[in-house]
Amino acid sequence: MKLKKLFGKILGAGLCMGMLIGCMPGGALQVKAATEPNYLTFTAEEAGSTLSLSWASASDVQTSTDHGTTWSAYARGTTITLANVGDSVSFKGRGFVANNRANVNHVRMTGKIAASGSVTSLIDENGGDPNVTLPSDCFAHMFQDCTSLTQAPELPATTLSGICYVFMFQNCTSLTQVPKLPATTLATACYRGMFDGCTGLSLTTTKDADHTLAWSLADATEELNWNAIMFEGCPNVDLGNGSKEPQMNTVYYQTCNHSYGSDGKCIYCGTEKAVDIVTPTPEAAPAAGITNAQPNGGTPTTPNTNNQAAQNTTANVKAPVTGEASSMASVILALLIAGGLAVILVGVCKMRKHCK
């Protein structure tokens, strides 16, 4: 009798636990770090591309070629070769400062290289914290004259320091998009000349077929020369009456490097993917003067149309992707498992009683 009561309690607990797990949201059991790492990463878009990194001051600068799994110490100015398209290297460090000396290439590149991840992983070894404290001059002139740079890294810091981004991407002629600038606390000359000479950028005040990606600056208190000559030397940038200096609370539009989702819309700007309409080619008419003559004066037969190639009208429709299991399905699965265990336990109890 006691065994039956114990079994009932175990079964009840199992059923309750199964129902609770089944009703939980899909991500409820996942544990996230406070700030997930977002390392500054460079990826080759051309085989044999190279890069090196220098600085005025920094500590414990390391690199990883396996997306942050293993790390190795990096010696200042060492050239790294990305042998194949898609090869990448990530960086992290502490207290990185490039400094504000003009005509200094703190990153040198050859080939074609796209940056991704957060540049602040050189300051806090993580890159995922938007509240990171930026030292003055930290990224000044960092990518100056990097004509091989095709994509800028993320700049997530919400509080800027004096001249932190000054001339950061000067003369990066292969850049085609301006990165997001979410800072809400500015500093003196923080964006001064940031994209000076970036001739590949195109930015306007109106949305059109060529400019579909919205871009704007977060609302913040203006500081001295905060946006001075920010897009100087960019012939395709017109921020109103020929201005090269963006303003707060204004939406601009730039060209978009479209990447389409399963719904056929660009994941960046929402533009729908153009569908190519294919017009079927009409069948050639029979040559003039040819008749369906039969040997020995026989009766002409009816043309056989059954063997003509049928037009392919089957639509190439992609099957819908099944999503995650619903909460109800999870509950049913849990109940089935608990029921199975109950049957096994009952069988074991009967066997033990029979043996006695």
Image (spheres, grey):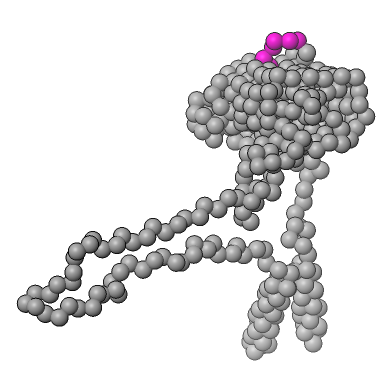
Q: Quadrant of residue 33?
A: top right
Q: Residue 18: x percent and y percent?
A: 75, 71
Position of residue 144 relative to residue 29, above or below, is above
Residue at x-position 75% and y-position 23%: 231
Position of residue 169 relative to residue 266, above or below, is above
**Residue 103 painted magenta:** yes
- Most distant residue in the front direction: 289
Residue at x-position 91% and y-position 23%: 223
**Residue 5 painted magenta:** no
Position of residue 13 relative to residue 67, above or below, is below
- Most distant residue in the bottom direction: 354
Quadrant into which the N terminus falls: bottom right
Residue 243 visible? The answer is yes
Q: Residue 101: x percent and y percent?
A: 75, 10
* Of residues 238 and 191, the one drawn nearer to the viewer in this rendering: 238
Quadrant into which the C terminus falls: bottom right
- Most distant residue in the right direction: 221
Q: Quadrant of residue 203?
A: top right
* Of residues 229 and 104, the one drawn nearer to the viewer in this rendering: 229
**Across the whole image, how many numbered discs are drawn on residues?**
0
Q: Is residue 308 left or right of residue 166?
A: left
Residue at x-position 68% and y-position 27%: 236
Q: Is residue 293 left or right of residue 13?
A: left
Q: Residue 248: x percent and y percent?
A: 87, 33
User: What is the magenta segment's predominant secondary structure?
Assistant: loop
Q: Residue 266: x percent and y percent?
A: 65, 48
* Of residues 246 and 339, the one drawn nearer to the viewer in this rendering: 246
Residue 42 visible? The answer is no
* Of residues 228 and 27, the one drawn nearer to the viewer in this rendering: 228
Residue at x-position 64% and y-position 51%: 272
Q: Which residues are magenta?
A: 101-107
